[in-house]
Image (cartoon, rainbow, N blue to C red):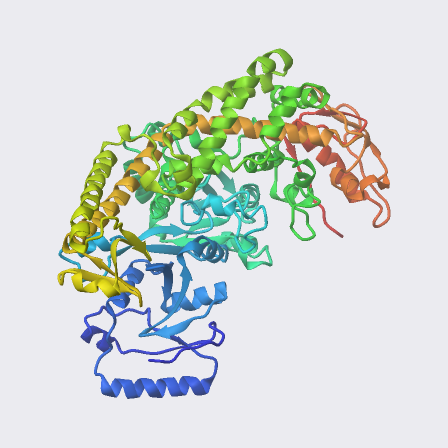
Amino acid sequence: KGFTCGAEPSVVSSITREETEMADAGQESSDWSPRCATGQPETTHRLQHAERDTSSRRSKSIFTPLEQQVIQLKQQHKDALLAVECGYKYRFFGEDAEIAAKELNIVCHLDHNFMTCSIPTHRLFVHVRRLVSHGHKVGVVKQTETSAIKASGANRNTLFTRQLSALYTKSTLVGEDVNPVCRLGDVEEGGCDDVVSDPPDSFLLCISENWDKLKKQLTVGLVAVQPSTGDVLLDCFPDGPSRSELECRVLKINPVEILVPSDLSEQTERLLHSITNASAQADDRVRVERRDSAEFEFASAMNTVTSFYCHIQAKGVVASLESPVISCLGPLIQYLQEFNLERVLRSESSFRRLTCESEIMTLSAGTLRNLEILNNQTDGSVKGSLLWVLDHTRTPFGRRLMRKWVSQPLTDLQSISERQDAVQEILESDSLTLNSIRSLLSRLPDLERGICSIYHKKSSTQEFYLISSSLSRLGLELQTLQPAMRSQISSGLLRSLLLDTPDQLIPAQSFLKVLNEKAAKSGNKTELFSDLSGFPVLQERMEQIQTVLREIQDHRKDIRLILKAPALEYTTVSGQEFLIEVKNSGSSIVPPEWVKISSTKAVSRYHSPFLVDRYKKLQQLREQLMLDCQREWTNFLDQFGEHYHTMKRAISHLATMDCLFSLAEVAKQGDYCRPEVCDNKHQITIRDGRHPAIDLLMGEHNQYVPNHTELQGDGRRTMIITGPNMGGKSSYIRQVALICVMAQMGSYVPASAACVGILDATVCHLHCL
């Protein structure tokens, strides 16, 4: 029992227990057994020998109350690593401790019946993020009772009750425990190198399959949700044995977690296996969560969806969804309910079709790979891709939108022209207004994720203040620029984006005025609200606390008379308040009923019976105040959430502005031109075209030789490129395709002139013979 291990925690051996012994101890049998870490077989033998000796002395295994509580929690959440709050630290037990010790590189040791390791409370967000990045599901178990309130109750001699307060996976990192903005702000300054940052996108993708035996056709349903931003994508499509359509959509969505049924087809399993193993780094791989296939059956999923949307406006939209999409939506609702993140699915305004053939250019999975649209084919990083060339955005939400623009070029001529007009005006205008607007976008927090965290009612006071103050400042700044916008900006797209945004950000100002800035930044919820007139419960509780404090202060008169010390004041030592400090030389006059709290060589400190009673009452009221403040804070976040969709539209406008500024930055690089995009012509005419990524990688050496392209619908429709190896054939083919993609994005292109007809698809298949 006293064995501890400072060796490698990943090398373990188990201490077996008979289930009958556990039953004798009043415990349910469980396959989650105590573990012991050791590095040598001899040590294992000695430990097992010691275990037999112990068993001979004791007839049954005895678990501590905390261990019994942990066993019950683990039986309810077998698939999660549980971090259990124990005072000033969080502890892992059993096999959870072994896994956590290995991933976090901390010491794991035997304590009573379980292996255990611990982390400090103020570092919880660091360690949870690291465990989640390695593909684990992590549960945070917190104490639900406070010491003073428990001491006054009937169960004061029992163990603190603990409950699972939050679950986290790669796609569900939303909440105070994992997103303390005040600390994560230090990451940009290099203050927290060990913090795992959020990926640009964190989509949770749910996939269902429906095989039609009569038509011998597979239909795939797909629902992707990003809980941290509120985006919801839907799709339903037929697919073949190669699963090329599914692969294309997975590449575009770039999920961090995939939800699938347990009876997934072999072809889809192979595809997911290749996707999850695409990265060599374990913390960059996609996590796959397998659920009971019964949840994906249409009848079961429909019941879940119907009960979820029965009182919500979105039920009209949901009723029109295809059955494979319903089969995804049902399990997704159940999964997000485990994390209390299902609220993002309640609004129909968040729903968006992933592919709409009439609005975007079709780019297959092979095309995305071969043209290196989103990642290069060498090491899979962004550098060298088209996204790397075009992404000069300054905000996280602008960066996410740019990825969508690159992978989904437009096919509507008017929308393309609007973007081109906006980029041209930014490029050519000397207006200080546009420069001021772009400077406003610099050093902004992730507003999109911030308001979504508030919408989930999982935001910390620091995060709320940072987000609401940023929104308020943006609204006021844009409001002052409105006269200049109306007189200096001519682009219809820019005017619609900028003139509507200030009004949509107005609600943030009213919420910000209620808060005490200092308390919000420090996370002190008891002093958070500067005006308590709108919070009668808190006002009453504060009055009760003030009443007790006055009684304690008035009690000084009696103490001064007893001790004959007219100037006596209370002292506070090590958190103990209202101490009566008396020199040891005069301790004879101290009444015997006074309670000694602490002492030194020179003085002793006491509480009178009155102070003992009033101080106990004060502590109870303070803890009750904290609980009341937490409830009022949750209600406050809920009220802010009523403006969520309005503010999300405003942030979407800011993201569009950021992307337009980024495209203008690209156009400034030199030798770029505005392409002519034609709706009624079938042609690709490019003069002095260059590969955008290679041209940028070569820098100022001007080694890339420009090329012409001339393709006409009623003329030369095909070109066959020949030449030696490494002669530039593939680069030329990619160059033509990338220029067409850039043109239909609304971007300038690397050429002296270009005229492109609208393409409904780009297909690129490159391989070596």
On screen, residue 743 versus residue 441, left or right, reads: right
Q: Give the x, y percent position of residue 403.
A: 59, 37
Near-viewer residue (586 or 690)? 586
Q: Give the x, y percent position of residue 721.
A: 82, 40
Q: Give the x, y percent position of residue 87.
A: 32, 60
Near-viewer residue (271 or 21)? 21
| Residue at 25% from the left image edge and 70% from the top image edge | 64
Can the viewer see residue 217 in this picture? Answer: no
| Residue at 56% from the left image edge and 30% from the top image edge | 655
Q: Give the x, y percent position of residue 708.
A: 83, 31
Taking the view exactly as shown, the residue that stands out farthest to the top is 487
On screen, residue 526 versus residue 548, left or right, reads: right
Can the viewer see residue 521 in this picture? Answer: yes
Q: Is residue 625 above or below residue 533?
A: below
For the N terminus, the quadrant is bottom left
The quadrant holding residue 326 is: top left
The number of numbered discs placed on residues in the rendered structure image is 0
Q: Is residue 584 above or below residue 267?
A: below
Q: Is residue 630 above or below residue 440?
A: below
The quadrant holding residue 524 is: top left
